[in-house]
Image (cartoon, rainbow, N blue to C red):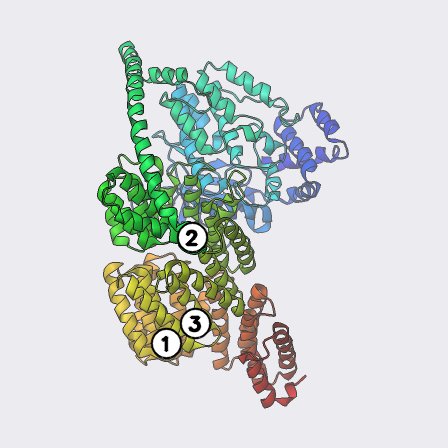
């Protein structure tokens, strides 16, 4: 039994003699205990406080503590093997784990690693949760100052472990500072490294919760690593998790809210890191041993005294004082703000924690330029600049007044169209008004070029915000003809080019733009476009790192846009749950105005991510609320309203309400026709979705007609190699395949593939998707060997370039199976379908998961294996019941072949019950004329014994 477990048992025994007392009396009793070691006293205090937080939890802990398995239950010694590694020596030990130095067996020129071995995880749920949490969290964190995890696992004996980077000769920051007699600046430099690493973790929605010297290691080269994320939490986890780890915190470094079992936030880590900084500067902790007993009541006085004890300058005093506020609302709102002030202090720059003033700024500048001559020169230049600025501003005011008059006359002229006498009293949309202004501008030949530049740029940006990217590009480029290096125009053009899928031109713009004069928001806008382009090329980690380096704080627009893009990048990485978590967290920020257009865009994106994970009800609720807000703020006829209407229609389609989906898509089509014209790209997108709905309703001819109209519009409006143009053609080919027009589908797909190979490359996901579709088309045409060769090559290529959980992989394996099926290779097809389920390549909420279950059931049915066929039909039905409920077309769609299977094997009673349920659902849904009812009638005619 380890010492830590023994301490818990002793503390538990003493606690049981005190648990009947009120809080204050119990704490007083603890303070009078004699001959009880301090570590046991601290545990007793935590148990008493936890009882006040959640009695049920503490009761469970007291039951669980004696059963905790000691690390020594699985005694390991140097020379033992674990996974592919040999243990060399023990280098660290904690209550739940031991850390060993190890090296990989049978490998040359490899560095040693650290292996963290966990105790008794197989028997203890809590420890297992710690292990899983640390493994998942570390796998998502990539930062030079965070320990690198290679992989994790569990041995056949139930011993769980993590294989991590080994820091040779590393010391914890406390020992390192003492051994090297570090200066204050060096100490703060190390604390800054920790702050930047933890800030990165926060950006990934992870709170460490146990920042202390032993979790901050310094390598022999002086680089810091943050370690031990064993009790870290995701920001959006339920608050009960904070209570579940109250017993694991370190009281000397924990924030007051941790000690008192209150809400945990990123500011918790700010407080703990500041305590570490004070300890390193002073050589001791700022808090007394009885801190937990007194519920942190004396924290403020002790912090004040600790900061006085150390002779530090006022700026560093103010920084640490702000980070150590006992009220989290008064601390830095983020770790990045804390890091920024520490960085500023190291550079002798002004810090946000010190009240701003002209004298303060001069003082800080003088600290950076200490020579007297430089100080006098600075003062002289300041006075000279002031005189110059006053003169310059006077002239500028006159110029701006003339510009304002010219702009006013231009806008009044453009706004004449809103006069009811001119326009017959009809409402004028924002897009129509913008068109009028643009037309007037094109007629203004004698306008001052600076005024014309401002108007062209403004009109171009306005078009982009309305979603008319063709017009936006036109006017932004005209503005660049006047001022070729303007940062705002260039950064907006980058954004527009991405929206138009003009990736080559965007790449060229990024490579050639001179960004040295860009404003912060202009550089951020260009960087976001670059990150999105990188994500298109599957460079997800680089794109995320690029966005994380954009410094912005809530509630700024850049902060909102950066978080929105992070959610988008997580989505590209096939992590829609993380996308949802990011946006839900952002929308919950009370500092953000929900009526901002950018915030409304967040809600639209969130609804799309809900659809991706199959959470249709949340998607519908979000979109219903959003569209009502948009109509109130923007009016009924607006591009944004049209876009949301279309998305709402898609949500109803996914939820199986085709009638409502059709209605909303037709509304979107009408709106886009009014705003952009009948042959616009926007109407083509609507036709594409209407085609999907028609296919779902079984009207394949109408679906193909809609899709051909969409293709025709795209060919008129977009270049032949435009990505969206190619995707629409691919959709048409899929419909043609279903309609047994595979020759035509093959021609289209070969044309698309040729363009994609040249424009996007062989390994781009769009190229691979087209190869997949072409392989299936070849199998439909009877070219089975060519189909199998192509699909196998494509799958291997995808596995080399994409994570196995990327949706492309499951889609390719599914198509492999379908191609085998077309070639009458039933067993091979079945094995491929089973591979998707067995390897958990899909989430249960994804549509392809349900389709795969159905395909497996059908495969077993072909092999005359009733038991397995029934098993997978029932799994598929259960999946759809969970997602959609009984009264839904998708649930009915799978119950029909299942009923036929039951009848075929003479399970008439079960078949009769299933039919009765289906008939009730059809009547409830008012679908008596639907094709499904006709199928049921045929079954009843063929098998009269099934009639109720």
Neighbour tally class for label 2: few under 14, some 14-19, many 20 plus, Cα within 10 Å:
few
Image-based side of 49 in relation to 754, left or right? right
Image-based side of 810 in relation to 778, left or right? right
The secondary element bearing badge 2 is classed as: helix
Disc number for residue 585? none
Q: CB atoms at circles 3 and 2 under 8 Å apart?
A: no
The secondary element bearing badge 1 is classed as: helix
Q: Nearer the viewer, residue 587 or 423?
A: 423
The mark closer to the camera, 3 or 2, is: 2
Q: From this viewpoint, which residue is outermost toward the right? A: 20
The residue carrying mark 2 is 421
Q: CA distance from mark 3 to mark 2?
A: 73 Å
The residue carrying mark 3 is 831
Residue 540 shows in this picture? no
The secondary element bearing badge 3 is classed as: helix
Disc number for residue 737? 1
Residue 203: x %, y % from top left:
45, 41
């Amino acid at each position: 039994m380890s010492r830590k477990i023994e301490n818990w048992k002793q503390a538990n025994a003493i606690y049981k003699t005190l648990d009947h007392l009120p809080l204050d009396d119990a704490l007083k009793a603890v303070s009078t205990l004699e001959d009880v070691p301090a570590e046991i006293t601290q545990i007793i205090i935590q148990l008493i406080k936890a009882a006040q937080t959640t009695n049920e939890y503490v009761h469970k802990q007291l039951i669980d503590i004696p059963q905790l398995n000691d690390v020594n239950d699985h005694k390991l010694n140097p020379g033992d093997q674990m996974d592919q590694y040999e243990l060399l020596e023990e280098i660290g030990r904690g209550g739940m784990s031991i850390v060993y130095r190890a090296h990989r067996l049978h490998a040359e020129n490899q560095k040693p690693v650290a292996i963290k071995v966990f105790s008794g995880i197989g028997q203890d749920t809590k420890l297992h949760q710690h292990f899983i949490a640390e493994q998942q969290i570390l796998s998502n964190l990539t930062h030079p100052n965070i320990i690198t995890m290679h992989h994790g696992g569990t041995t056949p004996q139930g011993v769980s472990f993590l294989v991590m980077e080994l820091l040779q000769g590393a010391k914890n920051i406390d020992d390192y500072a003492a051994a090297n007699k570090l200066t204050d600046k060096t100490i703060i430099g190390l604390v800054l490294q920790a702050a930047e690493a933890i800030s990165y973790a926060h950006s990934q929605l992870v709170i460490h919760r146990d920042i202390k010297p032993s979790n901050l290691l310094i390598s022999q080269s002086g680089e810091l690593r943050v370690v031990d994320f064993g009790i870290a939490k995701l920001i959006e986890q339920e608050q009960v998790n904070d209570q579940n780890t109250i017993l694991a915190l370190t009281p000397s470094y924990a924030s007051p809210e941790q000690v008192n079992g209150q809400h945990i936030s990123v500011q918790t880590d700010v407080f703990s890191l500041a305590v570490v900084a004070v300890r390193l500067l002073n050589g001791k902790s700022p808090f007394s041993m009885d801190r937990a007993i007194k519920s942190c009541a004396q924290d403020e006085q002790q912090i004040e005294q600790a900061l006085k004890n150390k002779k530090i300058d006022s700026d560093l005093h103010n920084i640490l004082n702000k980070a150590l506020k006992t009220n989290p609302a008064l601390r830095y709102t983020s770790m990045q703000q804390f890091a920024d002030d520490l960085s500023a202090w190291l550079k002798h720059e002004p810090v946000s924690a010190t009240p701003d003033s002209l004298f303060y700024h001069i003082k800080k500048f003088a600290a950076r330029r200490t020579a007297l001559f430089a100080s006098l020169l600075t003062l002289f230049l300041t006075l000279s600049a002031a005189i110059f600025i006053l003169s310059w501003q006077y002239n500028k005011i006159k110029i701006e007044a003339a510009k304002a008059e010219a702009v006013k006359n231009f806008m009044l002229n453009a706004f004449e169209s809103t006069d009811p006498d001119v326009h017959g009293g009809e409402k004028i949309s924002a897009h129509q008004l913008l068109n009028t202004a643009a037309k007037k501008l094109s007629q203004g030949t004698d306008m001052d070029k600076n005024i014309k530049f401002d108007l062209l740029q403004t009109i171009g940006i306005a078009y982009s915000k309305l979603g008319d990217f063709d017009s936006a590009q036109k006017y932004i480029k005209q503005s660049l003809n006047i001022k070729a290096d303007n940062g705002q125009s260039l950064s907006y053009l980058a954004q527009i080019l991405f929206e138009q899928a003009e990736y080559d031109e965007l790449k060229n713009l990024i490579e050639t733009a001179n960004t040295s004069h860009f404003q912060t928001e202009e550089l951020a806008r260009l960087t976001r476009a670059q990150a999105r382009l990188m994500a298109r090329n599957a460079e997800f980690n680089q794109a995320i790192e690029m966005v994380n380096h954009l410094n912005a704080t809530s509630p700024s627009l850049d902060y909102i846009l950066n978080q929105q893009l992070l959610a988008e990048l997580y989505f590209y990485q096939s992590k829609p749950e993380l996308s949802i978590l990011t946006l839900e967290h952002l929308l919950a920020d009370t500092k953000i105005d929900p009526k901002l257009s950018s915030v409304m865009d967040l809600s639209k994106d969130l609804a799309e991510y809900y659809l991706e994970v199959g959470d249709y009800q949340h998607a519908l609720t979000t979109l219903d609320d959003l569209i009502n807000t948009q109509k109130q703020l923007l009016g009924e006829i607006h591009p944004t309203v049209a876009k949301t209407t279309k998305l709402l229609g898609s949500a109803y389609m996914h939820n199986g309400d085709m009638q409502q989906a059709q209605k909303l898509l037709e509304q979107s089509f009408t709106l886009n026709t009014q705003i952009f014209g009948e042959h616009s790209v926007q109407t083509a997108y609507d036709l594409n979705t209407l085609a999907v709905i028609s296919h779902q309703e079984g009207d394949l001819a109408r679906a193909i007609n809609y899709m051909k109209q969409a293709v025709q519009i795209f060919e008129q409006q977009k270049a032949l190699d435009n990505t969206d143009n190619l995707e629409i053609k691919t959709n048409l080919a899929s419909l043609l395949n279903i309609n047994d027009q595979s020759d035509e589908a093959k021609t289209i797909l070969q044309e698309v593939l040729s363009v994609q190979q040249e424009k996007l490359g062989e390994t781009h996901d769009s190229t691979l998707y087209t190869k997949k579709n072409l392989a299936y088309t070849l199998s439909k045409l009877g070219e089975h060997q060519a189909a199998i060769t192509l699909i196998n090559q494509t799958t291997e290529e995808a596995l080399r370039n994409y994570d196995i959980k990327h949706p492309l992989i499951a889609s390719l394996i599914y198509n492999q199976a379908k191609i085998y099926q077309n070639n009458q290779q039933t067993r091979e097809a079945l094995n491929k379908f089973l591979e998707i389920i067995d390897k958990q390549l899909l989430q249960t909420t994804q549509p392809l998961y349900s389709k795969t279950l159905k395909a497996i059931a059908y495969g077993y049915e072909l092999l005359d294996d009733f038991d397995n066929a029934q098993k997978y039909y029932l799994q598929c039905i259960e999946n759809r019941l969970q997602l959609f409920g009984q009264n839904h077309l998708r649930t009915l769609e799978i119950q029909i072949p299942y009923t036929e299977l039951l009848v075929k094997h003479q399970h008439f009673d079960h078949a009769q019950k299933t039919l009765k349920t289906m008939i009730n659902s059809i009547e409830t849904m008012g679908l008596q004329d639907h094709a499904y009812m006709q199928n049921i009638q045929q079954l009843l005619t063929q098998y009269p014994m099934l009639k109720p």
